[in-house]
Amino acid sequence: MQIWIDADACPRVIKEIVFRASERLDVPVCLVANSSLAKHHSRLITSVMVAGGFDVADDYIAEHAAPGDLVITADIPLAARIVARGAVGIDPRGELYTEENVGERLSMRDLMTELRGAGMVQGGPAQFGATDRQRFASSLDRLLTRMLRGRNPV
């Protein structure tokens, strides 16, 4: 099992929560981004810098994440790809992506993109806050416990 982080847009506080869990449970983490990332002093944390371009980091994660791996991303198309491959996905607000909900989330994302493009809707998700951080930490802990015990995370 490995944890993958779509690191370009992942909040720093979420990365720090994952790093602590990684150390506590001895689970490797790989951050993937198309920009330079800070060096980490843990044998469990690696970084991959991919070329710039649309979805290059997502493509890398989708190609390398294996069934049973955990991917942390807010990118719903990437979540759909990794769930289809048998990996587990969670967003930075602690919501689990499943075969049952990822299609609906993808449809809603596409609809909102169209509405924003037509000027009918403005803005995006609410600002990331302390409640989101706590929800993510709790979800991550439950999820990793289930996965490491070999149980279905859903």
Image (cartoon, helix red, strand yellow):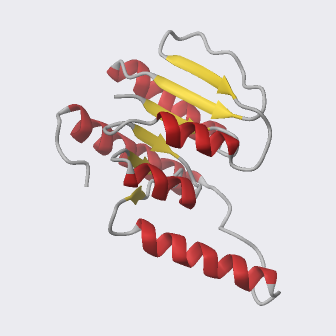
Quarter placement of the N terminus: top left
Residue drawn at the location 64% of the way across and 56% of the way down: 128
Q: Residue furthest front?
A: 63
In the displayed structure, would residue 25 be above or below residue 50?
above
Query: Is 90 on the left-hand or right-hand side of 42?
Result: left
Residue 74 point in image, percent of width and height: 58, 54
In the displayed structure, would residue 76 be above or below residue 28?
below
Q: Nearer the viewer, residue 14 or 72?
A: 72
Residue drawn at the location 45% of the way across and 75% of the way down: 104
Q: Nearer the viewer, residue 133 or 77?
A: 77
Quadrant in the picture for residue 75: bottom right
Query: Is 142 on the left-hand or right-hand side of 83?
Result: left
Query: Is 120 on the left-hand or right-hand side of 12?
Result: right
Residue drawn at the location 53% of the way across and 77% of the way down: 107
Residue 115 point in image, percent of width and height: 72, 85
Q: Nearer the viewer, residue 6 or 56?
A: 56
Residue drawn at the location 50% of the way across and 9% of the way down: 43
Quarter placement of the C terminus: bottom left
In the displayed structure, would residue 97 be above or below residue 41?
below
Residue 60 point in image, percent of width and height: 59, 37
How many tags in the picture?
0
